[in-house]
Image: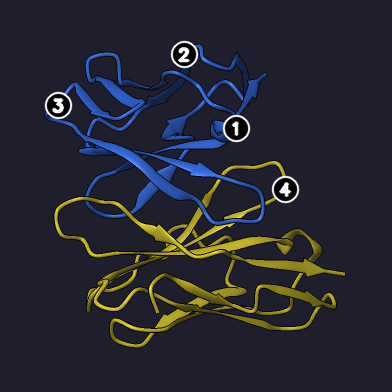
Amino acid sequence: GAGVSQSPSNKVTEKGKDVELRCDPISGHTALYWYRQRLGQGLEFLIYFQGNSAPDKSGLPSDRFSAERTGESVSTLTIQRTQQEDSAVYLCASSPMTGSAEAFFGQGTRLTVV
Amino acid sequence: DQQVKQNSPSLSVQEGRISILNCDYTNSMFDYFLWYKKYPAEGPTFLISISSIKDKNEDGRFTVFLNKSAKHLSLHIVPSQPGDSAVYFCAASDRDKIIFGKGTRLHILP
């Protein structure tokens, strides 16, 4: 596709359930980021993948959060035992890392934990 | 600890006037700065960027100024148009992860 694709666009889940969010980056982009935006807040960094390097997981808020990326393609963000404070828009971005740091964002997944 | 700070949560500007959005940062290792624009229910879109070796970058109505000694950058939009109403995020990169500020909501008044 032409841009970063995220699925699902909306997800409502019950507290305590696990959820999996998917991101398809732009083809050829080696860098992939996950961010979270809670209501009225800014973009909170979660995790960063760059090629075959070990991911930077420094932004993950708890061990309930994990993410994987297969090579330089699809990434999944998994939240286990969801809590109401996990409700947010989860945004994925990819970057070609050609010297500039410009990242291209997907539309996001709106997660609501009830 | 916020490394990128946007201290004004909102700003209102008359159509046709200049909009100035400000951003401060704390990490002197940042070597690239970016501005993103976000409309409701959409992902952020890249607007303009500047390398730390420059002090100004201009693209049409948008100009970004960087003051490294003050660790401050600003985005100027002139003339402001109704379609500029959005949330603007300042971001900084050290060639690793990109850190964003909390955003400033810009309202362009008719």
Q: CA distance from mark 2 to mark 1?
A: 13 Å
Question: Which amino acid type corresponds to the residue marked 1 in the rendered image?
Answer: Ser
Circle nearer the N terminus (2, 1): 2
Question: Residue B54, image x and y in percent?
Answer: 14, 26
Report helix, strand or loop for mark 3: loop
Q: Chain letter of disc 2?
A: B
Q: Quadrant of residue A33?
A: bottom left
Which of labels 2 and 3 is toward the front? 2
Q: Which chain is represented by blue in the image?
A: B
Q: Which SS class for mark 2?
A: loop
Task: Quickly name the residue at label 4.
Answer: A39
Which residue lies under the disc numbered 2?
A: B18
Q: Position of residue B21 (x, y in %)?
A: 47, 21
Camera-side residue of A64 and B59 = B59
Amino acid bearing label 4: Leu
3D distance between C-alphas at marks 1 and 3: 27 Å
Label 4 resides on the chain identified as A
- Say if mark 2 contacts mark 3, CB within 8 Å: no
Tag 1 subunit: B
Judging by the rendered image, the residue that carries numbered circle 3 is B54
